[in-house]
């Protein structure tokens, strides 16, 4: 099975997908005239708009929900894997993906808002909804919905849970070994699993409101705390910082770890971390209560910056400044002698696709506290990401319920996602990460090709941005009239505008 997963992963993550991700980001950056730079101030301002309603969540809550998906284990273990397999230069390509991906995030999240619907007293939207309503391709919408349910409900939760298990083991040790069907598992890891499953069940049975209320408190706190720890490490080693940035940039274009490895791992882990183009962000974006779709598109573009340029860079600087990393080939195995270590700074048996580099980096500065802090950070990063995955799976189940009625599918998703958390916790990390990569790749292929096709059919995201810019320039008020812009099937906004006009007449 592991060989099969690896083979499928190689096909999905071929150079074609890497170039597609970078190309789509550049394409939308040019079309929006680099809105991710021009509207940076507006992004920050929009973060704190308080338009929460009974049916929708606020822009900040939508940011928190999407960040809970973006800021996860990929920011700690994923960055470590990118450096371990691609060298320091992989960090540069993560930056490139974030900068270009911010425009992709704007486009997909704006589309999520334009074509959202109101169902069962809440707003829902995402790629499945805009593929059907804009492209008129129900088969593509159903394909994405199924892929998202499999990826977010089956493939991806295990990656987050696995990292939590590894972090607990690194901090507390294994404890007493318990014999299970998956081999021997440490008792401390099982305790961590029990805690996660109990809290997870309580929150996911409460819907998007409960998820939003939880993440809007936890996500800013955990991200800020993590960045502060990184800044302390940077401050204590200021003399090394220029050299580290020079190393990252120079290594991005050399063959130390292979330029292909640096680009491949930088793009793969960049997309895994910030999720731009993957099609996950539009689900939370669609749930927001806003005056204009472009507003949430800009907020979601900012979330990519927070994820990669802030949190991922924090991880990379800690690892590189303290030299707590190795660079090796993907097939390296210390026990069998397979593969090769290109650069060795620490024990050759240290697992690359894990939080180990980050924990060792903080441990070298803060001692045992650093190791414990990373364990706590991973717990919250991973747990909130699992919540985001559940919401995405739930939204796509709701979409498919139009064709397959009943509550059983949603109950099954809740059970499956909890089962996959348990499975990921007790399994090997390399295998679990490979499964997660398949999930990310499947969604990225469908969504990026879909949003590119949407541009050539209707250009709704670009029309929306220009309309918003024109209204801001005119001094407001801000509203959205899809009919005036020639955008079809944006029925939510059409009904909303009609109601506003009726209220004015009364």
Image (cartoon, helix red, strand yellow):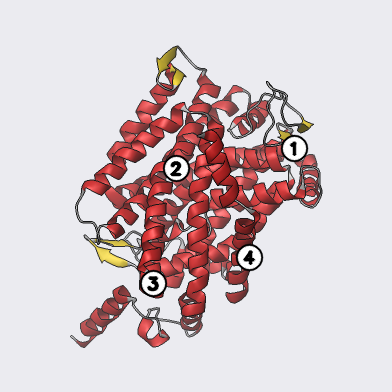
Q: Is residue 161 left or right of residue 260?
A: left
- Label 3 neighbour load within 10 Å: few <14, some 14-19, many 20+: many
Spatial separation of the CA atoms under disc 4 and disc 2: 26 Å
Q: Position of residue 198 (x, y in %)?
A: 31, 32
Q: Earlier in the sequence, mark 1 or mark 4?
A: 4
Q: Earlier in the sequence, mark 2 or mark 3?
A: 3
Q: Which residue is mark 1?
A: 237
Q: Earlier in the sequence, mark 1 or mark 2?
A: 2
Residue at point 37%, 32% (across, down): 196
Q: Earlier in the sequence, mark 4 or mark 2?
A: 4
Residue 23, disc: 4
Spatial separation of the CA atoms under disc 1 and disc 3: 47 Å
Spatial separation of the CA atoms under disc 4 and disc 3: 24 Å
Spatial separation of the CA atoms under disc 2 and disc 3: 29 Å
Q: Which residue is mark 2?
A: 155
Quarter of the image where one finds residue 487:
bottom left
Q: Nearer the viewer, residue 16 or 309?
A: 16
Between disc 1 and disc 4, the foreground one is 4
Q: Secondary structure at mark 1?
A: loop
Spatial separation of the CA atoms under disc 1 and disc 4: 36 Å
Quarter of the image where one finds residue 114:
bottom left
Residue 206 visible: no
Between disc 2 and disc 3, the foreground one is 2
Q: Which residue is mark 3?
A: 114
């Amino acid at each position: 099975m592991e060989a099969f997963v690896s083979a499928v992963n190689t096909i999905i993550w071929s150079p074609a997908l890497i170039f597609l991700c970078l190309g789509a980001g550049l394409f939308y950056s040019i079309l929006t005239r680099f809105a991710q730079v021009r509207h940076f101030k507006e992004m920050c301002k929009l973060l704190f708009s308080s338009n929460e309603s009974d049916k929708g969540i606020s822009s900040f809550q939508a940011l928190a929900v999407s960040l809970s998906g973006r800021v996860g284990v990929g920011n700690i273990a994923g960055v470590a894997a990118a450096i371990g397999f691609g060298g320091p230069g992989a960090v540069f390509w993560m930056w490139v993906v974030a900068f270009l991906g911010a425009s992709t995030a704007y486009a997909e999240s704006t589309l999520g808002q334009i074509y959202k619907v109101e169902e069962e007293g809440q707003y829902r939207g995402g790629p499945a909804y805009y593929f059907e309503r804009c492209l008129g391709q129900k088969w593509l919408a159903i394909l994405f919905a199924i892929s998202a349910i499999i990826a977010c409900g089956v493939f991806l939760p295990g990656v987050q849970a696995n990292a939590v298990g590894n972090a607990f083991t690194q901090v507390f040790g294994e404890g007493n070994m318990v014999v299970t069907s998956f081999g021997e598992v440490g008792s401390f890891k099982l305790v961590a699993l029990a805690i996660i499953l109990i809290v997870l069940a309580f929150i996911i049975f409460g819907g998007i409101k409960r998820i939003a209320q939880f993440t809007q408190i936890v996500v800013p706190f955990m991200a800020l705390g993590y960045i502060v720890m990184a800044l302390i490490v940077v401050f204590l080693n200021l003399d090394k910082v220029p050299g580290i940035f020079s190393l990252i940039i120079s290594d991005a274009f050399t063959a130390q770890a292979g330029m292909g490895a640096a680009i491949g791992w930088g793009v793969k882990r960049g997309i895994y971390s910030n999720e731009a183009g993957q099609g996950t962000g539009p689900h939370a974006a669609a749930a927001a209560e806003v005056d204009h779709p472009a507003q949430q598109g800009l907020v979601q573009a900012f979330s990519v910056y927070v994820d990669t340029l802030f949190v991922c860079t924090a991880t990379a600087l800690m690892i590189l400044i303290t030299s707590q990393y190795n660079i090796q080939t993907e097939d390296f195995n210390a026990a069998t002698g397979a593969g090769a270590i290109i650069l060795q700074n620490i024990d050759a048996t240290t697992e690359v696709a894990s939080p180990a580099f980050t924990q060792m980096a903080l441990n070298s500065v803060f001692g045992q506290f650093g190791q414990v802090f990373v364990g706590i950070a991973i717990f919250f990063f991973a747990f909130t990401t699992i919540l985001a995955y559940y919401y995405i799976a739930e939204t796509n189940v709701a979409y498919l319920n139009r064709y397959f009625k009943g509550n059983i599918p949603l109950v099954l998703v809740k059970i499956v996602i909890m089962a996959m958390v348990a499975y990921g916790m007790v399994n090997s990390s390399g295998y679990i990460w490979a499964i997660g990569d398949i999930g990310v790749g499947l969604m990225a292929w469908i969504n990026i090709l879909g949003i590119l096709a949407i541009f050539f059919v209707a250009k709704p995201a670009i029309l929306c941005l220009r309309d918003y810019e024109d209204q801001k320039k005119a001094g407001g008020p801000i509203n959205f009239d899809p009919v005036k812009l020639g955008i079809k099937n944006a029925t939510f906004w059409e009904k909303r505008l009609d109601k506003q006009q009726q209220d004015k007449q009364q």
